[in-house]
Image (spheres, rainbow, N blue to C red):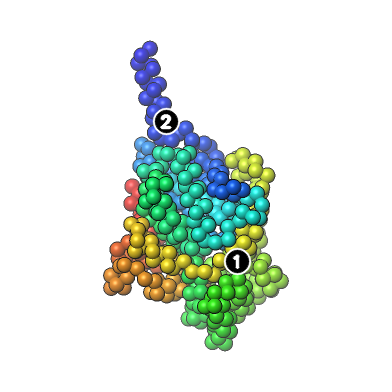
């Protein structure tokens, strides 16, 4: 009897140490957990955790990677999960190169109003990047309360697009909260994928980039450059909402002059002039929303994702809030129009100069909306402690399985990765290069 009791106690302790108490069967393969955290009164943020399926005795042996989507208003649990790096693809097939095979992955619908996250009224939407960051810190406090076993696990924050503004400030506020003793967390790094960290540098890169690729001629270049220059004038005068509207006008000029180039991968086949006509039929705000939150003007894949998230996923996760997935995404984007064109370069510089957090930028060479030349420009203008060492550092090739997948430059706590054969969505476009970046930052396995 005593032996049976000891065995039972040992089993319970083992289950607790592995976190199996929280693990559930959600949608798709592997153990999962999910839930809502009230980050403020009236603001409810959703996370979806995938425990690693790596062959380890305890999943805490592998790091925790957070994924933040762009937009603002795009859904991490939807787009990032099913279109880029989760265990299942949008069509339900298994993704061989998914992140959960190597580490624990948590998708967060952020800012509140994105995806499954929701607010009780319009007064609770976020309007600044700082508020987004503070909400994410509150989310982590609630997450660690539910999952204390993750407090000592190395935490790595990865993001894409507008996440290039949100993730650095989130990391900075989380670091300071750790220093103040407000939260226990083993924050290690932040990786910025094709980031919108300096919006105006991205916009100014469009005309020369398209000209060099032969996608526009000199006349098209000049028209795009003129519109981008008008955007910069508003940015320089800190007229942020007008800058956002002028950015959208510049986007329309690009679509017209390029005959419908895809903003997220310049080599993606499009409908050409039909694509342009479809975009011109939209209002300016609708065009901005569809491009940034849905990542495509084509509605077909959007419809598939919406049906999946509002149907089988909602049912499997037993989401009963009464707010449908994605229902508040448009309002989430609109609430941040006054913050959309503000840069976060100084935040990255502060992370590198005042914290121990490692920072990386990975950029797909076929991306237009956050084109690599724009990232190179804001990095060159950024001030941080190890800048001189970075400028003097060599650029080396990234080779995976004897194939050149890109290039890397590192000094101190900062790395830049140029990724070949990839557009805006590096994890989906070039998983081999993305795996190299993940291993470089997280040391998994």
Cα–Cα gap, marks 2 and 1:
47 Å
At mark 2, the secondary structure is helix
- Residue 397 lies left or right of residue 222; in this view the side is left
Point out residue 92 in the picture as x, y percentages from the top left corner: 57, 48
Q: Position of residue 212 (x, y in %)?
A: 48, 81
Left or right: 413 in relation to 287: left
Q: Quick check: 54 above or below 210? A: above
**Which residue, as the protein is rendered here, is positioned at the far right?**
281
Q: Position of residue 329 (x, y in %)?
A: 63, 57
Residue at left offset 63%, top offset 63%:
334
Quadrant in the picture for residue 356: bottom left
Say whether marks 2 and 1 touch (CB < 8 Å).
no
For disc 1, the marked residue is 337
224 relative to 144 in the view: left or right: right
Asked if residue 385 can be seen in this view, the reply is yes
**Residue at the spot of label 2:** 15
The answer to whether residue 15 is left or right of residue 296 is left
Q: Quadrant of the N terminus?
A: top left
Residue 130 image position (x, y, % from top left)? 50, 59
Select label 2 or label 1 by which is in front: 1
Q: Give the residue at x 36% y 39%.
A: 56
Q: Secondary structure at mark 1?
A: loop
**Which is more toward the observer, 168 or 127?**
127
Residue 224: which disc? none
């Amino acid at each position: 009897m005593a032996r049976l009791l000891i065995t039972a106690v040992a089993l319970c302790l083992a289950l607790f140490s592995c976190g199996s108490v929280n693990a559930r069967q959600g949608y798709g393969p592997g153990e999962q957990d999910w839930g809502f955290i009230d980050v403020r009164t009236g603001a409810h943020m959703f996370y979806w955790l995938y425990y690693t399926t790596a062959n380890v005795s305890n999943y805490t042996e592998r790091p925790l990677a957070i994924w933040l989507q762009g937009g603002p208003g795009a859904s991490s649990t939807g787009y990032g999960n099913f279109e880029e790096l989760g265990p299942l693809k949008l069509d339900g097939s298994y993704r061989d190169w998914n992140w959960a095979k190597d580490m624990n992955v948590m998708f967060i619908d952020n800012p509140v109003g994105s995806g499954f996250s929701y607010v009780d009224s319009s007064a609770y939407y976020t309007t600044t990047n700082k508020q987004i960051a503070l909400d994410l810190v509150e989310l982590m406090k609630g997450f660690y309360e539910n999952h204390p076993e993750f407090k000592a696990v190395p935490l790595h924050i990865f993001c894409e697009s507008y996440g290039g503004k949100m993730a650095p400030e989130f990391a900075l506020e989380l670091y300071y909260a750790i220093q103040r003793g407000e939260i226990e967390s083993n924050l290690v790094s932040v990786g910025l994928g094709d980031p919108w960290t300096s919006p105006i540098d991205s916009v100014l890169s469009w005309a020369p980039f398209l000209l060099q690729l032969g996608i526009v001629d000199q006349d098209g270049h000049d028209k795009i450059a003129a519109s981008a220059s008008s955007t910069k004038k508003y940015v320089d005068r800190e007229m942020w909402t007008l800058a956002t509207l002028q950015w959208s006008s510049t986007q329309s000029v690009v679509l017209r002059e390029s005959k419908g180039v895809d903003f997220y991968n310049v080599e993606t086949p499009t409908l050409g002039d039909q694509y342009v006509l479809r975009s011109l039929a939209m209002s300016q705000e609708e065009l901005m929303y569809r491009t940034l939150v849905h990542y495509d003007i084509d509605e077909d894949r959007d419809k598939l994702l919406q049906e999946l998230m509002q149907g089988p996923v909602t049912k499997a996760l037993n989401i009963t809030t009464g707010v449908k997935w994605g229902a508040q995404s448009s309002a989430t984007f609109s609430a941040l129009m006054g913050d959309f064109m503000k840069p976060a370069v100084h935040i990255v510089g502060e992370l590198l100069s005042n914290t121990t957090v490692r920072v990386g930028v990975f950029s797909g060479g076929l991306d237009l909306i956050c084109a690599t030349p724009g990232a190179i420009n804001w990095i060159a203008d950024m001030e941080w402690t190890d800048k001189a060492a970075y400028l003097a550092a060599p650029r080396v090739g990234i080779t995976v399985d004897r194939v050149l997948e890109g290039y890397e430059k590192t000094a101190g706590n900062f790395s830049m990765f140029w990724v070949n054969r990839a557009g805006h969505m590096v994890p989906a476009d070039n998983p081999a290069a993305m795996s190299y970046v993940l291993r470089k930052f997280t040391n998994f396995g």
